[in-house]
Image: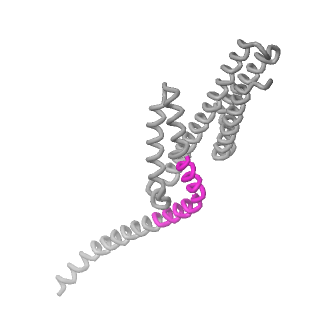
Amino acid sequence: MVDQDLLACLSAIEAQWNEAEAYVKHVERLRRGLVVGASINELRYAGRRMVEAYGRIKDRPGDVTARAEALVLLGEVKHFCIRARHDAIDGAVTYIDQALAKLESEFGPDLLHDKFPKYLDMKQALQEIGIIMSQSRGDREARDRLYHDLRGGLVDNLIQNHLELEVSRAVLEAAYVARIKNSKREQGRFWLTIVVAVLTLIAATAAIPLIAKLLRLG
């Protein structure tokens, strides 16, 4: 006889696992292949619980206690899958925060804002996400709800803006090179003006005695 409760639990686990695995892979692509180690560990723990659940019932299929223990273990699998998604979200946000800081150091915030109008939106989103993540600590149920909302809103938008910013890198580099050239040109003009002024002053100073002599002769 098929155990409908176990089947329902396994079906829920299948959906949770597939969703978690897909999101972890999505974040790994965002991070250019860098593995989200914390998420992989959570999925490994989930797999371990499934093996343990199977071990409870394989030799005692009709044992009520073994069945109850297996259901508890399978319930833990769901939470490990959810935590794998949470860790992937953390990994994505950390990666984007660091990547944005690197771009700020390389090109300057003013140039980023000038050439990528969504830059300030990204900065604000990172700040808001940080506050929400801090609120989620210590309360698993609140954490699940808050992270679910993050993934469907702020984080997805942040990821999309980051991908657009990466595409705009060539524009940033060209603008930065142009700015450096303009800066050097302006600097050259400044020093040329200084040199001309100094030479003019020297020439004028040297001409004073001659002018005075001509005036006396006159």
In the drawing, does residue 160 fall left or right of residue 69?
left
Residue at image position (25%, 79%) is 210
Residue 170: say if magenta.
yes
Outermost residue toward the front in this view:
1
Residue 107: say if magenta.
no
In the drawing, does residue 189 fall left or right of residue 155?
left
160, 5: nearer the viewer = 5
Outermost residue toward the right in this view:
59
Above-or-below relation of 83 to 110: above
Viewport quadrant of the C terminus: bottom left
Above-or-below relation of 33 to 176: above
Image quadrant where residue 13 sits = top right
Q: Which residues are magenta?
A: 156-183
In the drawing, does residue 156 fall left or right of residue 43?
left
Residue at image position (52%, 41%) is 150
Residue at image position (77%, 17%) is 57
Residue at image position (72%, 13%) is 64
Number of labels in the image equals 0
140, 62: nearer the viewer = 62
The chief SS type of the magenta part is helix
Q: Position of residue 83 (x, y in %)?
A: 60, 31
Q: How is the image coloured?
A: one colour
Q: Position of residue 9 (x, y in %)?
A: 69, 28
Outermost residue toward the bottom in this view:
218
Q: Position of residue 51 (x, y in %)?
A: 76, 22
Above-or-below relation of 157 to 198: above
Q: Position of residue 5 (x, y in %)?
A: 70, 26
91, 138: nearer the viewer = 138
Image quadrant where residue 55 sits = top right
Above-or-below relation of 141 to 147: above
Viewport quadrant of the N terminus: top right
